[in-house]
Image (tube, rainbow, N blue to C red):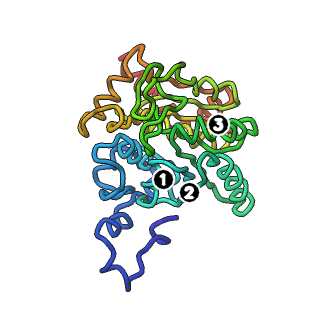
Amino acid sequence: MDKEKIKINPEFYDIMPVEYQELVENATYGKEDRGWKDVGSSKELIEEHSLCAGCPESIAFRHILASLPNPEETVMVGSTGCTSLVFPHIALHNIHSLFGNQNAVASGLKRALAYRFPDKIKDVVVLAGDGATVDIGLDMTLQSWFRQEKFATICFDNELYANTGGQESGLMQKGFVGKMAPAGKQFEKVDMPGLAKTSGCHYVAMLTSSKPNRVEKVIRNAVLIAREIGPTYVQIYTPCILEIGKQMMEGLQEMRDSEGPGQRFEYQEFITDEAKAYMEAKHPKKKRKKKRVEEKKVD
């Protein structure tokens, strides 16, 4: 997928919404050094998306879309939930799966693409909420990791079922009282990063979307390692401001407050020795840049 393939038919151009015209014209496809800094001048998600005003998921979506290393040849697999409402508004190939089977669909898709296009790099990225990833789809999530399927899994952790009224999810905080969980959560938040590590993931990260440069680094690592080594997992806190009683402008601060030292979303990153060796061998440019920075500090 590139700008040559996603042109709007000239006969229909003038009746297409301006947002969709800009979606095609201002996407950053083909730009090798694309990243979160392009968000202000490019467009991979239209303004008139269907998420709530101020929703942290929209922030995370923009950062992720800008950080994908190979958007022209990437297919995202989503699931039922808030994320499924916004996928029609992004400039990227995507598939909507049934609730919870997104990792099973991605497994078949990745294998089919590898068979059909053996000489092309085709990335598959799963993006779903905590209900689809950890509750209803946990078996298929884990099985894809056990089989070492080569795609990245991103979980938007709302800490509840945001799309259907605030029911309890496995990632809800202990003691939290939701609109449809009046008794409060009775057990601890599921340690999904821990499960990912012990289930075969070669790269695992947990963070919020308040620091776009960190999101960019994590997403690139997750996609590149999954491409060659094996499954990767990223868990991003995207609080549902409606369900936790916040105003639309308070989502960013909620994420910042939750990622401090000792907080439940304090930044975590894990990488296997195999994945680390691959990144150092295949992507030496970043390694050299880091070395130059360290040498400057010494000087």
Q: Which amino acid does label 3 sit on?
A: Leu
Contact (Cβ within 8 Å) of mark 1 with mark 3: no
Between residues 37 and 151, which one lies in front from this camera angle? 151
Q: Is mark 2 on a helix, strand or loop?
A: strand
Question: On the image, numbered disc 1 is attached to which residue?
Answer: 84
Q: Which mark is residue 138?
A: 3
Tell me if residue 267 can be seen. no
- In screen coordinates, is 147 left or right of 269? right
Question: On the image, numbered disc 2 is attached to which residue?
Answer: 96
Which quadrant, please, contains the C terminus? top left
Tell me if residue 58 can be seen. yes
What is the crowding at mark 1: few (fewer than 14 residues within 10 Å), some, or many (at least 20)? many
Contact (Cβ within 8 Å) of mark 2 with mark 3: no
Q: What element carries label 3?
A: helix
Residue found at x 68% / y 53%: 110
Residue 206 percent coordinates (x, y): 49, 28
View extreme (top): residue: 262
- Quote the CA–CA distance across marks 1 and 3: 18 Å
What is the crowding at mark 3: few (fewer than 14 residues within 10 Å), some, or many (at least 20)? some
**Which of marks 1 and 2 precedes in the sequence?**
1
Q: What element carries label 1?
A: helix
Between residues 283 and 265, which one lies in front from this camera angle? 265
Residue found at x 63% / y 55%: 121
Q: Quadrant of residue 211?
A: top left
